[in-house]
Image (cartoon, grey):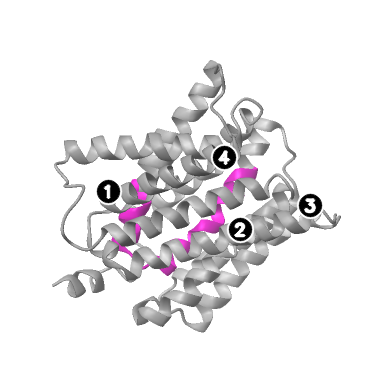
């Protein structure tokens, strides 16, 4: 039965899962460099729109190749539309928030999302409940990220408040999206269909947003911008999201989500490698803290 299939999720992450999660986090960490590189040429929200629309086409072609049906009479269309709306809300709020607050503050507020997941999911699914040690691990990982970006939080500006609130909206939308996928009929279907719903409907909602706010496609586009959009669309939103939803389909969401704290760490590492940012003791301590936190979350009771 469907219930039995969902309950068959692996309780602890094996080597394959950990490897795939780390690859996804690396991809998501480096994508910030690709996004910022063309921000002056392609507006941020337009980048998100192009990514969702283009990636939905990629996933659709993948489904055709694998002969996975897009639409079935299994009551997944409405949950899919809701997940797509939440996905669009997350990125609209995130990119809008970055106009008002700095990246360091945004990272801290965005990574409230795993706490949303582990707070709400056990209400619906008992197997997703974390024990005390695992909750401590989640907090340790969060504090490690906060410590890494602490220097960027010391100077408060009035203009940050609006941005901070928007980033919190993005974090809540991210967390609620993960929960909605796990507790709805989307939890029973092929991961490709789940991510297609999310990308397809988010592409529609983001396109409507761009239309009504007057955000237009650039008149011309450079080779660098094309390369960046290709990476964001095919590698990030199509391939890595397919992998991520496969992980959510086969492993406990609370365990998979805990690794999300690696994304900002990788983001800073890639900034050090490609942008010349300094490698400091603070970064090394934060890396250790995140590693300890993830270990605690995924340790066997």
Vertical order, 119 against 141 (above or below): below
First reached walking from the N terminus: tag 4 or tag 1: 4
Classify mark 2: helix, strand or loop: helix
Residue 213 in which image quadrant: top right
Q: Is residue 179 left or right of residue 278?
A: left
According to the picture, the residue beneath numbered tag 2 turns out to be: 110
First reached walking from the N terminus: tag 3 or tag 2: 2
Image location (x, y in percent) of residue 116: 52, 70
User: Which residue lies most toward the front here?
Assistant: 212
Residue segment shown in magenta = 242-268
Q: Is residue 297 left or right of residue 180?
A: right
Q: Nearer the viewer, residue 146 or 177?
A: 177
Q: Is residue 51 left or right of residue 99?
A: left
Q: Which mark is on residue 152?
A: 3
Q: Are marks 3 and 2 in contact (CB under 8 Å)?
A: no
Image location (x, y in percent) of residue 242: 33, 47
Asked if the magenta segment contains residue 58, the reply would be: no
Q: Which mark is on residue 15?
A: none
Q: Is residue 263 left or right of residue 121?
A: right
Mark 3–mark 2 distance (CA, rounded to whole Å): 15 Å
According to the picture, the residue beneath numbered tag 4 turns out to be: 45
First reached walking from the N terminus: tag 3 or tag 1: 3
Q: Looking at the image, which residue is at 77% across and 59% down?
A: 161
Neighbour tally class for label 4: few under 14, some 14-19, many 20 plus, Cα within 10 Å = many
According to the picture, the residue beneath numbered tag 1 turns out to be: 192
Neighbour tally class for label 1: few under 14, some 14-19, many 20 plus, Cα within 10 Å = many
Residue 278 in which image quadrant: top right
Classify mark 3: helix, strand or loop: helix
- The C terminus - image quarter: bottom left
Q: Are marks 4 and 1 in contact (CB under 8 Å)?
A: no
Mark 4–mark 1 distance (CA, rounded to whole Å): 24 Å
């Amino acid at each position: 039965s469907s219930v039995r299939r969902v309950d068959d999720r692996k309780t602890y992450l094996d080597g394959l899962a950990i490897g795939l999660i780390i690859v996804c986090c690396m991809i998501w960490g480096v994508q910030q460099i690709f996004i910022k590189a063309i921000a002056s040429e392609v507006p941020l929200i337009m980048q998100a729109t192009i990514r969702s629309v283009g990636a939905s086409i990629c996933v659709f072609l993948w489904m055709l190749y694998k002969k996975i049906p897009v639409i079935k009479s299994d009551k997944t269309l409405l949950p899919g539309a809701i997940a797509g709306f939440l996905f669009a809300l997350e990125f609209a709020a995130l990119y809008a928030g970055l106009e008002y607050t700095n990246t360091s503050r945004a990272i801290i507020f965005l990574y409230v999302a795993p706490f949303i997941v582990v707070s709400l999911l056990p209400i619906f699914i008992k197997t997703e409940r974390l024990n005390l040690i695992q909750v401590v691990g989640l907090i340790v990982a969060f504090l490690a990220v906060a410590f890494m970006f602490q220097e960027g939080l010391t100077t408060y500006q009035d203009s940050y408040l609006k941005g901070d609130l928007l980033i919190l909206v993005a974090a809540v939308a991210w967390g609620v999206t993960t929960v909605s996928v796990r507790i709805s009929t989307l939890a029973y279907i092929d991961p490709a269909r789940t991510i297609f719903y999310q990308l397809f409907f988010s592409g529609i909602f983001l396109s409507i947003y761009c239309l009504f706010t007057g955000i237009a496609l650039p008149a011309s586009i450079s080779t660098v911008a094309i390369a960046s959009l290709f990476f964001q669309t095919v590698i990030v939103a199509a391939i890595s999201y397919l992998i991520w939803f496969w992980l959510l389909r086969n492993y406990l969401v609370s365990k998979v989500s805990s690794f999300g704290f690696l994304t900002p760490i990788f983001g800073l590492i890639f900034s050090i490698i490609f942008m010349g940012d300094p490698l400091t003791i603070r970064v090394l301590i934060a890396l250790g803290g995140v590693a300890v936190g993830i270990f605690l979350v995924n340790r066997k009771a």
